[in-house]
Image (spheres, helix red, strand yellow):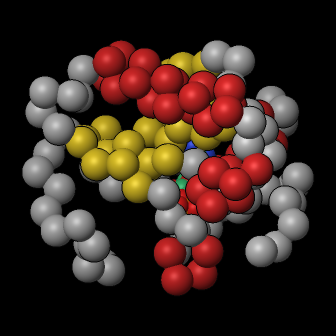
Amino acid sequence: MAAYDSNNIFAKILRGEIPCNKIYEDDFAIAFHDITPKAPVHVLVIPKGSYVSIADFSREATAAEIAGLYKAVAKVVEQLGIEEGGFRTIANTGLNGGQEVPHFHLHILAGRVLGPMVMPKV
Ligand code: 5GP
């Protein structure tokens, strides 16, 4: 696994160096709208700690950080009002997983029927 790159876009967002459309923040996580949404609702939830991927996070983060991230997901889902209609959560990882930004993030997609789990490339 590559070392964490502190110049990745989400690290810059966390440091306030570039803007984002933030909808949630607590001690452990922030959530903001994806810049190129793939569904009517497309939000990214990211831990404040420096973790490359879900594998890195799950292995290295403290129990408080892990709980904090998932509690943040629950808050965001509630805030967005998407639980009843349903939503999809994705964590792309590495080259085969199509991960573009090497700071662990969960995509939350909602607002329409999303279709097959692995979407065809357009
Ligand atoms: P990945 O492919 O790494 O799982 O997803 C990265 C996501 O970050 C993509 O959906 C992409 O649209 C989004 N993204 C990339 N750069 C920015 C940015 O500067 N701001 C925001 N809000 N989203 C970004």
Quadrant of the rendered image containing residue 118:
bottom left
Q: Left or right: where does residue 7 sit relative to residue 58?
A: right
x then y, percent, for residue 17: 84, 36
x then y, percent, for residue 13: 74, 38
Q: Left or right: where does residue 119 sit relative to residue 70?
A: left
x then y, percent, for residue 106: 50, 47
Identify which residue, 70 or 99, lies in the foreground.
70
- Could you tell me if residue 21 is visible in this image? no
Q: Residue at x 48, y 57 (%)?
A: 91
Instruction: Give the number of callouts.
Output: 0
| In the image, residue 76 above or below residue 98 | above
| In the image, residue 107 above or below residue 27 | below
Q: Residue at x 32, y 18 (%)?
A: 78
Quadrant of the rendered image containing residue 87:
top left
Q: Residue at x 74, y 36 (%)?
A: 62
Instruction: Locate ligand 1 by image quadrant.
Output: bottom right
Q: Quadrant of the C terminus?
A: bottom left
| In the image, residue 8 above or below residue 97 | above
x then y, percent, for residue 44: 50, 42
Q: Quadrant of the N terminus?
A: bottom right
- Could you tell me if residue 115 is visible in this image? yes
Q: Residue at x 52, y 74 (%)?
A: 98
Q: Left or right: where does residue 63 sit relative to residue 37?
A: right
| In the image, residue 115 above or below residue 107 | below
